[in-house]
Amino acid sequence: MKLNLKIWRQKDAGSKGKMMDYTIDGIDGDMSFLEMMDVLNEDLINKGEEPIEFDHDCREGICGSCSLQINGEPHGPDRLVTTCQLHMRKFSDGDTIVIEPFRAKAFPVIKDLIVDRSAFDRIQQAGGYISINTSGNTQDANSIPIEKENADDAFYAAACIGCGACVAACKNASAMLFTSAKVSQYALLPQGQVEATERVQNMVRQMDLEGFGNCTNTGACEVECPKGISLENIARMNREYLAANIKG
Ligand code: SF4
Ligand code: FES
């Protein structure tokens, strides 16, 4: 395949960025999107030009590092896949592909296609943990009965990889889907009850402090989430938040 690429280039956080045009040839449908980017970077290096910076780590859809806005969609046109798991067979010979960083005030661009998603880390730090009594009376977690439905829902919420596609997809750049997944994974389990009240209050407060927008129930986040995190988590977080504020 021969492809035309329009890619966002930005020197650093303080510089103004712009779209640049590139042409690439010999792309196989079995290559991943990131492998196509590797081929482009090899070409650029061989020509003495600066390669394009982009985030990646596991390339197996589990770390959440890869974060490209491809033709206006976070992680591209396929559903339930990350950018690293997107294959070039989803595109056709002669296509033009527009590649940008995830756009949100709370995700400032560091360089080219890399954005700073440390706001998510700070939301996690505000409440994404549980206390365990280690005085010698610790109960074996496997001996605590948990309803199957709750265990399943907690597991599905815990599948969030913190990629930020939900924020990039949202017209308000809201982080409600991410934050609600992190709140839900504990809210559904007995181990999460000790800090339940402070957790939801602190995580929502941090989310607002980071400059994410409000949720207006558009649902774009759920559509673009590579892990299928459900909007039900947002409803659960809202209930948790209300109950926590009533308790005070
Ligand atoms: S909710 Fe989905 S889109 Fe948002 S950070 Fe988690 S995995 Fe990524
Ligand atoms: S590189 Fe780890 S999820 Fe894509």
Image (cartoon, helix red, strand yellow):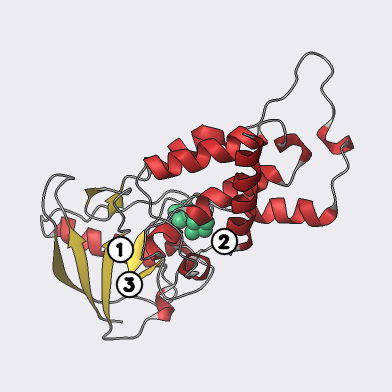
Q: Residue at x 41, y 70 (%)?
A: 31
Q: CA distance from mark 3 to mark 2?
A: 19 Å
Q: Residue at x 75, y 20 (%)?
A: 133
Write down the quadrant of residue 248 in the picture: top right
Q: Which residue occupies the foreground of this view, 120 or 65?
A: 120
Q: Residue at x 27, y 63 (%)?
A: 100
Q: CA distance from mark 3 to mark 1?
A: 17 Å
Q: Amino acid at mark 1?
A: Met
Q: Residues within 10 Å of mark 2 (few under 14, many from 20)?
A: many
* Label 3 element class: loop
From the viewer's perspective, is the residue at label 1 or at label 2 nearer? 2
The mark nearer the N terminus, 1 or 2, is 1
Q: CA distance from mark 1 to mark 2?
A: 23 Å
* Label 2 element class: loop
Q: Is residue 127 left or right of residue 163?
A: right
Q: Amino acid at mark 3?
A: Gly
Q: Is residue 145 above or below residue 40?
A: above
The circle on residue 72 is 3
Residue 162 image point, x, y percent: 49, 50
Q: Residues within 10 Å of mark 3 (few under 14, many from 20)?
A: some
The residue beneath circle 1 is 37
Q: Is mark 2 within 8 Å of ligand 1?
A: yes
* Label 1 element class: helix
Q: Is residue 210 above or below residue 19?
A: above
Whether residue 35 is visible to the viewer of this picture, yes or no, is no
Locate the N terminus by quadrant.
Answer: bottom left
The residue beneath circle 2 is 227
Residue 119 image point, x, y percent: 39, 41
Exactly how many numbered labels are in the figure?
Answer: 3
